Every structure is written in C-alpha cells, then in structure tokens.
Image (cartoon, rainbow, N blue to C red):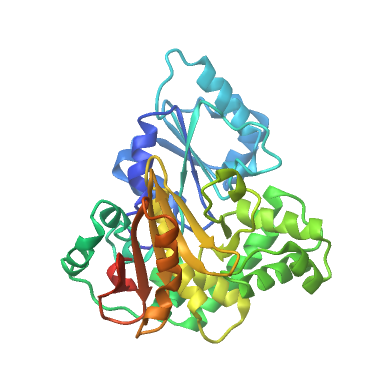
Amino acid sequence: MLHYLPRYAAGLLRRALAAAPVVVLMGARQTGKTTLARTEPFLADRLYLTLDDPETHERARRAAPDLVRSAERLTLDEVQREPDLLLAVKRAVDEDRPRRHGRFLLTGSANLLLMQRVSETLAGRAAYVNLWPLCRRERLGRGTPGIWSDLLATPVADWPGVLESRDEVPADWRTEVRASGYPTPAVALAGDDARSLWFDGYVRTYLERDLQSLATVGNLVDFRRLMRVASHRLGGLINQADIGRDLQMPRTTVQRHLNLLEASFQLVRLPPYSVNRGKRLVKSSRLYWSDPALALWLSGADSVSGAHLENLLLADLLVWRDGQAPAPDVLFWRTTTDREVDFVIETGDRLLAVEVKATTTPGLADTRGLRLFRQEYPERFAGGLLLHGGRETQWMAEGVLAAPWWRVV
C-alpha cells in the first residue's frame, strides 16, 4: 500500500461537508479520491461503499433508495458508474427535515456536471470539490501547493523576502515532469520504464472502461490518436479544424472527443483573459493536460520541453485554485500581435501575471509580455513573475521579478 500523502483538497472537502448535505469529490481515476475518502480522520465515521464492487453496483441499479439509506453518513465511490443513483440521493436529501450537512460524500472519475448521461445535477444540494494529480509539494508530503496565496497577499516589492524566507532545495523541472502527479508512478515506481508500463495500462483502462461510462465511443483507435495529437499541442491554442485535418476526422467528432477528455479530467482548457468576461467564452483556449508526465508519455517524445514546464506549473495552480473559496480564475493573455503571458491569476480586482521560461539565464526580452500586460492594466496589476529554470532571484523591470520555479511551487 502507498503511504498516504496529505492532500490540499482535503481542507476544502472538510469545509464543504460542514456546509452542504451532499459533497461530490471529482477527479481522474488514480488521483487518490478513494485513498483520501478512506484515510482522512474527519471521514472515519462514514460507511464506505464503492460501485467498483459488483454487488454494490447491482444494489445501486436495482434498489438505489435502499442503498442511500444504508447509513446516517455515507460515502459512495465511483458514482459515475450508475448516474441514476443521483436521483435517489436527491430524493433522500429532499426528504430530510431539517437537512443534515455532510450526509453524502460522492466520488467520481468524471465531471458529473459535464456527463451527458447524468440528468440530475443535485443543484442547490451539493458542493463540488476537485482532486487533481499530486502537485510537487504534495509529493513531498507537505500537503500544500505553491505559495500563490502568499504572493497575492504581499506587495510586489516584498516578494524577494517572501521567497528567500523559505528554505527550498533546488529541483530539476525535467525530473519533476517525469515523476507524474498520479500517486502510484509518483511514489511507488522508480524509473521511466516502470512508469511507462503504468501509463500504458492506465490509458488502456481509461479507454476501455472509464471513457465508456461517459459516452459511447465507436472507434477507440481514433480516440487514442487524438490523445496523441493533443499531447503534441501542449500549451497551444485549440484549433479543432486543424486537429480534424491532421487526423482526417470531422470537426464535430474532434469537439466531442476533446469534451470527453475534459469531462474525465484528462484535458485542461485554459481560457484567455479579457476584461469582457463574455469574450472569454468564445475565444480560443490553450490546451494542457492534468498530468504533464502522461502528456509526455502519450507524445512518445524522448525529452521534455518548456511546454511541459508550463504544464507542471499549471498543475500546481489548479490544485491551489480549487482549494480556494471562492476559486480565483486562472487564465492566459494574448494580444493580436502575439504578445503573451502564460498565466494570469484573477482574484477580486487584482491580476497576478506569470511567465514561464525553461532557461537558466532569463533576460529582459523574456519579460516583454509581462511588461506590456502591466502597461495595459496598471491599476489591477498585482505584480509580474518570471519563473525560470535557474537559481537566481532578481528584478527584471518595475514590478517584474524573476525567480526559480521551485521557490514558488
């Protein structure tokens, strides 16, 4: 058995159980949902049932109302395998007078809000918590993501002091990318060969089992080809027409497959920043994976690239973002002249801009996007951060600090 590593999402999960009758813990298979649900002390008084067990699955299919009344506090694992079970949960909650907070904890390896087969969303009854793959500090046993909250709470002039006050050990981002955020390859497996075998089995299980619980996919070979193409476009703008031409696949099929990858927490779409929030919904998003190691394996590449470092930092941002209440927005910024900022964190009326460079010796040219972003939004600009692969922390321009990536995440 793997040693349990504390998860940052557990804090939000605990608060959600104290505030809602139903809490849904969602995330990709093998991210540690079951381990969290069965290990955290504040969940010890609950009856645990999983739909991975054939007998329990049969009970959920034939006698869902009786199943949901099995205990005062009930954890139901992998509920996406029987979506109609949610209707029984809804009825049980509605019959409660007064409603009991924390009565049901549901876990699922797919985003129930995006599943076409799910007609019941538990609106007004449920809180939703996402469990992403392990970030670096969770792998180290700290149970936290990067210091994004500290940076946002500190004037930009004081950022060097915040960074230097922490005794961090330098890390190689290439090694961290390959380590993966899935607990088994991250903690229990040593070496690329063992991880490669694990990823092969993981993708096979995902295609043959988890994917089918979301929707019927007629051609799994084409779906896997799309996964590989998407892994090669890491950090790029999503252009469904281009992907369709490359794969000789209808655009509607490309869109459907990308939606399925997102619904199962494999693919991450990063929206663009715009003052007009409506435009964020219609402009092209950037494409990333929830685990950069899986993206690297799918691509078949022998070496990692700067896009994988971006993905590594985004994975940390996702863990941090979804542990906040309310959750801030994590976006990117791109101008019509192709000036970019990799990540923009929007919280309240403040904007933290983050640029990522794999170089060990960043220069002024690497901050062009950050400096332009500061000029565009001077009143909301909380600071610019250039995260790089070196070891030096230094000011690059007014309000723009260059720092090693491992000092932040």
Q: Quadrant of the C terminus?
A: bottom left
- Tell me where residue 289 appears, x and y as whole percent: 55, 64
At a point 63% along the width and 72% down the height, the residue shown is 233
Query: Who's the residue at 26% across and 55% down the image?
Result: 150
Quarter of the image for the N terminus: give it: bottom left
Left or right: residue 107 versus residue 371 is right
| Residue 159 seen anywhere in this rendered image of the structure | yes
**On the rendered structure, is 140 left or right of 321?**
left
> Which one is nearer the viewer's eye here, 49 or 286?
286
Q: Quadrant of residue 352?
A: bottom left
Q: Residue furthest top?
A: 97
Residue drawn at (52%, 54%) of the image: 273
In this rendering, the count of numbered labels is 0
Instruction: Specify whether residue 179 is in view.
Output: no
Percent of width and height locating residue 242? 75, 69
Image-based side of 29 in relation to 15, left or right: right
Rendered view: 1 above or below 41: below
Q: Which of the two residues, 271 or 288, is positioned nearer the viewer here?
A: 271
Quarter of the image where one finds residue 120: top right
Taking depth in this image into account, of 173 and 202 the one nearest to the observer is 173
**Which percent across, then down, holds residue 42?**
30, 39
Q: x, y percentage for residue 82? A: 64, 39
Residue plotted at (59% across, 50% down):
280
- Report which quarter residue 198 is drawn in: bottom right
Image-based side of 274 in relation to 284, left or right: left
